[in-house]
């Protein structure tokens, strides 16, 4: 397997992990946002 494959693979995995993190954090972010706007 070529190096480019692995670097591309790493990038894709990183993006996926980032998406998952964002999705997990989104409810908390929305909560804090609504809290700030609600006050």
Image: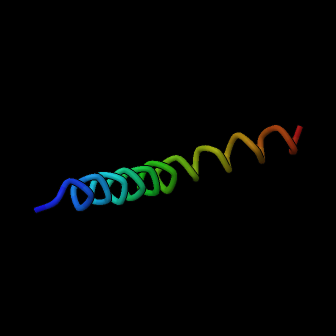
Q: Nearer the viewer, residue 32 or 13?
A: 13
Q: Is 2 left, or right, of 13 in this rendering?
A: left
- Taking 35 as reference, is 15 above or below it? below
Where in the figure is residue 2, as x and y percent of width and height?
16, 60
- For this orientation, the residue located farthest to the left is 1
Q: Is residue 6 above or below residue 36?
A: below
Residue pictured at 35% horizontal, 60% vertical: 12
Relative side of 12 to 25, left or right: left
Color theme of the render: rainbow
Query: Which x, y percent locates residue 28?
Result: 58, 44
Residue 10 position within the rendered picture, expressed as x and y whole percent measured from the top left: 29, 52
Residue 1, quarter of the rendered image = bottom left
Question: To which quarter of the image does residue 37 belong?
Answer: top right
Residue 33 image point, x, y percent: 76, 44
Q: In the image shown, does 5 or 29 lie closer to the viewer? A: 5
How many labels, in total? 0
At horizontal 37% and vertical 52% (from top left) the residue drawn is 17
Q: Quadrant of the C terminus?
A: top right
Q: Left or right: 9 with respect to 35?
A: left
- When asked about the image quadrant of residue 5, the answer is bottom left
């Amino acid at each position: 397997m070529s190096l480019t494959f692995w670097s591309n693979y790493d990038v894709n995995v990183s993006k996926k992990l980032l998406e998952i993190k964002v999705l997990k954090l989104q409810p908390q972010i929305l909560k804090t946002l609504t809290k700030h706007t609600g006050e």
